[in-house]
Amino acid sequence: AAWAGVNNACWDIIGKLKSKPVYELLATDCVPNRKIPIYASGGVSHKWYEDGENQLIEEALKYKEQGYTAFKFRNGTDWAHGKMTMKKYLPILGKLREAVGSDFKLMIEKLNWSFEEITEQLCPVLEDLKFYWYEEPMNQWEEGAVERHHKIKAAMPSVMISGGERFTNRFQLQQWISEGAYDIIQSDCNLTGISENWHISRMANLYGRLQCPHNWHGGLTTISNIHFVAGAPNGHMCEINQTYNPFKEGLFKEPLTVVDGYMSLPDKPGFGVELIEGIDKKFPW
């Protein structure tokens, strides 16, 4: 993972030397897509000890008003402290779906629920509410994880399972891809580097899996992952972290922007962006 940043920087250099955008260099077997769908990634801070239900719904509606068509959310604040239970939680998911409408994509990321809670209680509700995907429902490093993911898929046939953000190479992902434990591969150029993720995307495409990288940390990660998605035959969407993060918006002279749920890539060599002057002083740490 430490090498990933160097690898990504090399792609920017190569693109500038060849006077081509990185996405064109990556699209060896497909037509690059310069306009990438973006989903709003949040649902971090709704407070169950206050009015977490309405806070979550209001956050989703805010993104819809901004033009996003998809929202992924997490568990909010600590469940034990907020006296939240699965029995209380499931009706809230129904109210969320009703508020955003049937055409708005909803995705949920894991919480430390038991396998039985997931398959017997949560999955039927996600299926009924037509959620788009369920992200990393179980710890992928534990023995038997692939088999458990297959059982979770069986409990919600139309809801996709996504994962793989912590894997750093194609060998770790091979079984998950070939056996269909993941429908959406979320390998992140911030951990794999663009070169390795290129190979992962081609392997995933052979099995009909979609590529939608985890993308949380900042602008440099985003520009790498966006070019990767644009140059992949199975590039699907990209994540944008909605929490406050100056390292996300404040790195480039022309900030990356999302308009009506899409980010358009510049038709310039390399990554097509320039760092601001004095970046070491603005972000000393």
Image: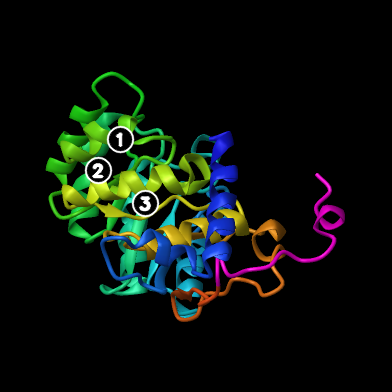
Horizontal side of residue 272 vs 232, given as left or right: right
Q: Which residues are magenta?
A: 269-285
- Of mark 2 and mark 1, the one earlier in the sequence is 1
Q: Main secondary structure of the magenta part?
A: loop
Nearer the viewer's eye, disc 2 or disc 3? 2
**Element class at badge 2:** loop
- Of mark 2 and mark 3, the one earlier in the sequence is 3
Residue 26 quadrant: bottom left
Q: Is residue 21 a member of the stretch shown in magenta?
A: no
Horizontal side of residue 149 vs 274, given as left or right: left
Residue 159 in the image: x percent, y percent?
21, 53
**Element class at badge 1:** helix
Residue that carries the numbered disc 1 in the rendered image: 173
| C-alpha distance separating marks 2 and 3 | 15 Å
Residue 241 in view in this figure? no
Q: Residue at x 67, y 65 (%)?
A: 249
Disc 2 and disc 1 in contact, CB within 8 angstroms: yes
Q: Is residue 281 a member of the stretch shown in magenta?
A: yes
Amino acid beneath label 1: Leu
Nearer the viewer's eye, disc 2 or disc 1? 1
Residue 167 in the image: x percent, y percent?
41, 35
Work out whether 6 lies above or below 278: above
Report the front residue among 132 and 285: 285
**Element class at badge 3:** strand
| C-alpha distance separating marks 1 and 3 | 21 Å
Count of residue discs: 3
In the picture, the disc for residue 182 is 2
Residue that carries the numbered disc 3 in the rendered image: 108
